[in-house]
Image: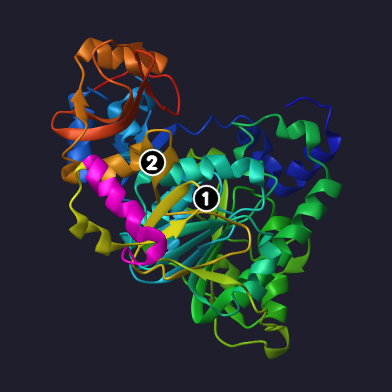
């Protein structure tokens, strides 16, 4: 750390005292991944990693997470990544969702969801059952959130673009569980992001704490009585963590919940005092992760339970919801029949889902999603198809979901052509007529193809040096 930001140096010295240099010299957190149990299993994925001769170590607090010390391949170029069998997700980042302990069938809110690693983790644990509402106020970050959710194969969610502070009114006492991974100074990621030094200031810190405080109030309002919130940040600053919680405890009917001792034993407790301010003794039930002590990004996690309503704060706003459609309703019926005929999909499968309609798009969601908030709705579930020149084009995600049902327009490529297609996004081919096709590999549909002007094209998240 340079001496340019004296405010930050003084702040860290006060916070860490003799450990300040250890903190500043802490190594970067190693790469980590999480198996997506919607599409794969831990056993199958471990076998896959061994097949690739990839070294990995299990993350101590989760069965589905692995540390990848040397990602030389890299794994982001594997077909397994393209198919959504795993998600890159930091080690510390995997803890808040585990602590929230969601169950299939519950109503869950991820309040600041983008870019989506925790959202995909929630969806996997929920097993596509219940209702998962994902919100983020930053439109710039929604593209990554949507891409990650599509790739993971979740259908029990929808995405909103609203100020988090408004959710407590729009969804008053609605959710069983809420994750608030709050926007923060990211001071726990200093080893990974030394540029924090350029912009960090006490003024910026105070501005962030106001946002965090009001987001947490909104979360409490949106939570059912006896529901639970996990509040987390990737900051080590008490102003963004214990001090906010202490203020909330004084003003709102929530209490700190003791998290499982086997998790807490791996890390440090929350502060019981800071800068001559005493906190509730229950604050020690929080978890603090320090980069220099735990060899991972710094994090703070605490769990709160709502035991009552603060009636004067429960202002119910009449929100506009739109119903999702059943497959046999007029708005959807002709479209799914057209898709069935074009792709050879049995009509019997459509009853397993409900549907959302756009002007040229149709999404399929779990039957548990009977309505969505109309205001600032972005997307929901799997994007089934887009209306194009040659009819309804299925997407990579929907083709993977419906792989075993698609009996028409299936094509396969030689391995060399497959490698070139993923490397360039297109290849020359003079044998296949124009139109949309399903790319088959090892008897499984893996992607949607578009053939036009003697070229086969594929939509990819990035160019692949494909590893099968």
Q: Is residue 93 magenta?
A: no
Q: Is residue 333 magenta?
A: yes
Residue 47 locus on image (x, y percent): 17, 34
Tag 1 near tag 2, CB within 8 Å: no
Taking the image as shown, residue 298 lies to the left or right of residue 262, namely right
What segment carries the magenta color?
A: 326-343
Q: From this viewpoint, is residue 265 visible?
A: no
Residue at which label 2 appears: 151
Secondary structure found at label 2: helix
The answer to which image quadrant residue 24 occupies is top right
* Residue at 68% in and 79% down: 317
Q: Position of residue 229 (x, y in %)?
A: 53, 69
**Quadrant of the rendering where the N terminus is positioned:** top right
Residue 127 falls in which quadrant of the image? bottom left
Which residue is tagged 1? Answer: 359
Give above or below for 350 relative to 428: below
């Amino acid at each position: 750390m340079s001496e340019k930001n004296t405010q930050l140096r003084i702040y860290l010295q006060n916070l860490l005292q003799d450990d300040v240099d250890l903190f500043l010299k802490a190594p970067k957190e190693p790469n980590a991944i999480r198996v997506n149990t919607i599409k794969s299993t831990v056993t199958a994925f471990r076998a896959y990693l061994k097949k690739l001769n990839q070294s990995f170590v299990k993350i101590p607090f989760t069965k589905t997470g692995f540390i990848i010390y040397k990602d030389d391949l890299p794994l982001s170029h594997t077909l397994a990544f393209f198919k959504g069998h795993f998600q890159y997700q930091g080690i510390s980042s995997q803890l808040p969702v585990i602590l929230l302990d969601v169950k299939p069938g519950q109503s869950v809110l991820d309040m600041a969801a983008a870019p989506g690693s925790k959202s995909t983790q929630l969806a996997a644990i929920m097993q596509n059952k219940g209702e998962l509402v994902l919100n983020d106020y930053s439109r710039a970050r929604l593209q990554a959130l949507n891409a990650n959710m599509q790739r993971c194969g979740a259908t029990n969610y929808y995405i909103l673009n609203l100020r988090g502070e408004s959710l407590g009114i729009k969804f008053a006492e609605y959710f069983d569980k809420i994750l608030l991974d709050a926007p923060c100074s990211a001071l726990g990621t200093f080893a990974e992001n030394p540029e924090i030094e350029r912009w960090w200031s006490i003024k910026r810190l105070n501005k962030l704490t106001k946002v965090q405080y009001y987001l947490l109030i909104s979360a409490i309002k949106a939570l059912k009585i006896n529901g639970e919130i996990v509040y987390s940040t990737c900051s080590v600053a008490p102003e963004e963590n214990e001090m906010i919680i202490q203020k909330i405890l004084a003003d709102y009917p929530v209490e700190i919940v003791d998290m499982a001792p086997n998790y807490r034993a791996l890390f440090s407790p929350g502060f019981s005092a800071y800068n001559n301010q005493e906190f509730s003794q229950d604050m020690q039930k929080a978890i603090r992760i320090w980069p220099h002590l735990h060899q991972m990004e710094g994090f703070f996690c605490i769990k709160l339970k709502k035991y009552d309503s603060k009636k004067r704060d429960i202002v119910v706003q009449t929100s506009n919801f739109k119903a999702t459609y059943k497959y046999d309703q007029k708005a959807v019926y002709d479209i799914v029949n057209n898709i069935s005929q074009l792709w050879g999909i049995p009509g019997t499968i459509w009853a397993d889902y409900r549907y959302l309609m756009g002007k040229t798009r149709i999404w399929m969601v779990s039957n548990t999603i009977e309505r969505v908030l109309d205001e600032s709705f972005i997307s929901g579930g799997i994007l089934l198809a887009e209306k194009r020149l040659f009819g309804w084009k299925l997407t990579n995600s929907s083709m993977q979901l419906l792989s075993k049902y698609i009996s028409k327009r299936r094509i396969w490529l030689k391995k060399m052509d497959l490698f070139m297609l993923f490397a360039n996004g297109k290849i020359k081919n003079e044998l296949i007529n124009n139109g949309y096709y399903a790319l088959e590999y090892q008897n499984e549909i893996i992607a949607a193809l578009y053939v036009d002007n003697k070229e086969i094209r594929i939509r990819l998240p990035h160019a692949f040096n494909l590893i099968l």
